Amino acid sequence: MGTMYVIQEDVFLGKLDERLQIKHRGERLVDVPLLKLQGVVVLGRATVSPSVVDVLLERNIPLSFLTRYGKYRGRLEPEVTRNIFVRRGQWTAAGDTATSLVAVRGFVRGKLKNYRSLLQRKQRDSDRLDVTGAISQLEGAIAALPRTPTIEQLRGYEGAGSAAYFGVFNQLLQGTPFEFTHRNRRPPKDPVNSLLSLGYALLRHDVQSALNIVGFDPYLGYLHTERYGRPSLALDVMEEFRPLVVDAMVLSLLKKPNGLSLGDFEQEPLNGAVSLTEDGLKRFLRAYEEKKQSEFKHPVMGRKCTYQEAFEIQGRLLAKFLMGEIESYPPLVLR
């Protein structure tokens, strides 16, 4: 099963023998063998029994709480692993160091190269698409990375590359009733932004869980500066996965004949927040889970793996770099 998503409001999560049970007003909605669970995500309000808290912590199964709009609210964290050597390497590299510069260069390179690959694929698939300008801008930013001497300048190239990519994102929606003008969030004010925000929130849950397994402190990052309560390292590592997992899945879901339509969204009258209806949310979560479990050949490991496995693989490669076992961090880049 992988990750279990709970979307019914005001449910009760209990445990019966070796199964996790979801109940609403005393009525059992579903129960799942704990053996099959790798994570639990609650979108909305829920009550969690002490026995469920115990078993999730004991088995290192992360539990995250999000709003229906994908805003992160908190999580139940299993104990950090005992691999103190990973955290020592992570803290030694903190700040404006040569090691953190190399790590940030890897994060930015992975994100921009995967942006470029996605646009190149879309350009090849459609004669009516013209995203060559954005591709050229991304190529220029990528070419400049090896000789960029500061983290601040790398952040500038990351921002410029993202602006070029989202500047043509609306073209990728050709043939659908959806439109995209710019990124907006907290809350998202249109369907496309609501899907991207929700997808990134789920991705953050998965990457942070993987980093926790490897032994990192997810709150100490390099590309993202330290901020109270912000899992900066999880945000760093998820950059290369944004186009690969979330953007690709969202575009596919909006273009499929049986994907999402405008009728699958609703808008809050007071703050204008746009979110999925319950039925639309079920289809979105199913598509995200299917994307995570899809296989590809990992370019560094040389074997097939799923994106779910790749979250942890990239964490372990980053740990090897920070502990001095490899010369640089190799981001996951797919063509």
Image (cartoon, rainbow, N blue to C red):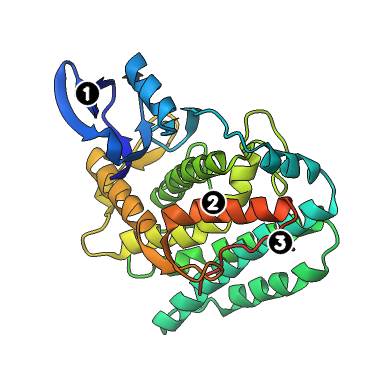
Disc 2 is placed on an element classified as loop
Q: Residue 221: x percent and y percent?
A: 69, 43
Q: CA distance from mark 1 to mark 3?
A: 45 Å
Mark 2 against mark 3, which lies toward the viewer?
A: 3
Q: Which three-letter amino acid code belongs to the residue tagged 1?
A: Asp
Residue 201 spot, x, y in % from top left: 47, 42
Q: Which picture quadrant has residue 113?
A: bottom right
Measured along the vertical axis of the image, is residue 163 above or below residue 223?
below
Is 8 displayed left or right of 115 in the figure?
left
Disc 2 crowd rating (10 Å Cα; few below 14, some 14-19, many 20+) is some
Q: Which mark is residue 326?
A: 3
The reply, left or right, for residue 329 in relation to residue 308 is right
Residue at the left extreme, as displayed: 27
Q: Is residue 159 above or below residue 127?
A: above
Amino acid under disc 2: Arg
SS at mark 1?
Answer: loop
Disc 2: which residue: 183
Which residue is at a point 44% across and 33% down the rendered structure image? Answer: 60
Q: Residue at x 63, y 34 (%)?
A: 230
Q: Residue at x 65, y 36 (%)?
A: 219
Work out whether residue 181 can be spotted: no
Task: Give the mark nearer the N terminus: 1 vs 3.
Answer: 1
Badge nearest the viewer, 2 or 1: 1
Q: Name the side, left or right, on which 243 lies relative to 93.
A: left
Question: Position of 17 compared to 157: left or right?
Answer: left
